[in-house]
Amino acid sequence: MQKRVVILLLDSFGIGASEDAKDFGDLGANTLGNIAKACFNNLADSNDRNGALKLPYLESLGLGLSALKAANELPLGFQSQPNLIGAYAYAKELSSAKDTISGHWEMMGAPVLFEWGYFKDKNDSFPKEILDEIMHKTKIKGYLGNCHASGTEIIKDLGEKHLETLYPIFYTSADSVFQIAAHEEKFGLDHLYALCEEAFQILEPLKIARVIARPFIGANRESFKRTANRKDYAIKPHKKLLFETFIEEKQGEVISIGKIADIYAHVGITQKFKAGSLMELCDVTLERVKNAKNNSLIFTNFVHFDSDYGHRRDISGYANALEYFDSRLKEVLENLRENDLLILCADHGCDPSFKGTDHTREYIPVLFYHKDLQPAFLGKSESFADIGQSIAHFLGLSPLDYGKNLLNFKGQP
């Protein structure tokens, strides 16, 4: 029997502060709940949307009920008894961090149980010897930034100085990351990528999870904007991934859409598709759902929820993007094949109503749809790895080292 798996990951779409949120300074965070509350109270109205948050297809898969279990309250405007077609759970993170890589790796069987390296100082964030080595090896004459910053704000603040000097902009955040912003045309995209590759080699021994190239265009503060040519340089996963087992045991295809391949350092990926906007990510995903062969795993990261709305603390924008995504989810559901397993999930939270600009430690929704799956609550998962273990069970693969299978199909004992 030929099967496919389709994973739609809404980057940053948490559903309530997890039990260890206090350790991360995130008590009270609830990405979905606080967006729904703002919408219900008409505080997220704009030219693009108004009123209560409307996500009928996500609700039918169990989103609201999953959030109710996670946060002990139903998101405002959601139904307590939706027309349920999916099975749902909620999951806590086993990994020691709340970043993109930790969440993604864990769900494919490689939880991060060690500590990443971090740059904790808000200013003068990077050690001088590291900066000196980067300058020496890349022949750059100087740099700007060297601080914690919002990526969109720092190019506004330093973009014009960057154009004058052509010094790259170095910055970080609460995550294990070293980000480099540079003008795509004046500094050059290939130059930026080469700089990031060299920086990655220097930083890898410090267990810095990612170096990220952040190209932008524009002529001044008012016109600067980031482009779709972001590139992530990530440490390779420390354990064997579900992807690799699928390829070895079933000769499967693993199809990356968006930044999935970069997040997993291209390990176990057989096909890669890039997309620049939320609409393009939806378009490419739908095209692959329609046309990818059987024995495939299609995995899309919808990054814009995090990068454009979560970090920028844009509640209305996040709500509008969710409603757009929900409208496209209808098309995905309509084009699933007889033996497709659909999974919707997230990798962490990034509550746009919360203090600061960083990720938030939250439970994530885990929503499943398959024609032979009974609509039901599947319980609380103690690890995101339950997602990968459930996929391994569905595909008939050897079990992962972490996680438990959540799925029981009609006709199974």
Image: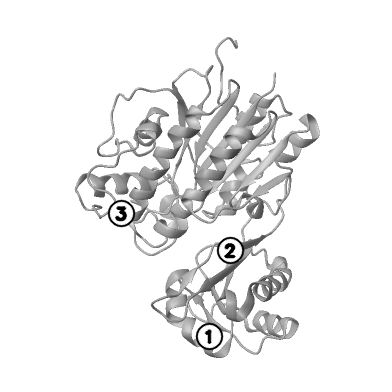
On screen, 286 above or below 318?
A: above
Circle 3/circle 1 CB separation < 8 Å: no
Residue 234 located left or right of residue 343: right
Is residue 385 visible in the rendered structure shown here? no
Amino acid type of the residue that numbered disc 3 sits on in the rendered structure: Ser
Query: Nearer the N terminus, badge 3 or badge 1?
Result: 1
- Between 90 and 84, the one lying in front of the other is 84
Dot 3 falls on a residue whose secondary structure is helix
- Dot 3, how many residues are within 10 Å of its Cα: few (below 14), some (14-19), or many (20+)? many
Residue at 68%, 67% (x, y): give it: 206
Task: State the residue at coordinates (68%, 76%).
Answer: 191
Q: Which residue is mark 3?
A: 316
From what the image shows, is residue 176 above or below residue 192? above
Give the distance between the C-alpha atoms of the residues marked 1 and 2, in whole angstroms.
19 Å
Please report whichever mark, 3 or 2, sits nearer to the chain's N-terminal start.
2
365 left or right of 403 in image: left
Number of callouts: 3
Q: Disc 3, disc 2: CB below 8 Å? A: no
The spot of residue 7 in percent (x, y) is 56, 37
Q: Could you say where residue 44 lies in the image, as x and y percent from the top left?
A: 25, 52
Find disc 1 in the rendering and name its residue. Answer: 163
Q: How far apart are the two marked residues, 3 and 1, measured between alpha carbons?
A: 32 Å
Q: Which mark is residue 230?
A: 2
User: What is the x, y in percent for residue 23?
Assistant: 45, 55
Where is the C terminus found, in terms of image quarters?
A: top right
User: Where 107 falls versus 259 (above or below)?
Assistant: above
Q: CA distance from mark 3 to mark 2?
A: 24 Å
Quadrant in the picture for residue 16: top left
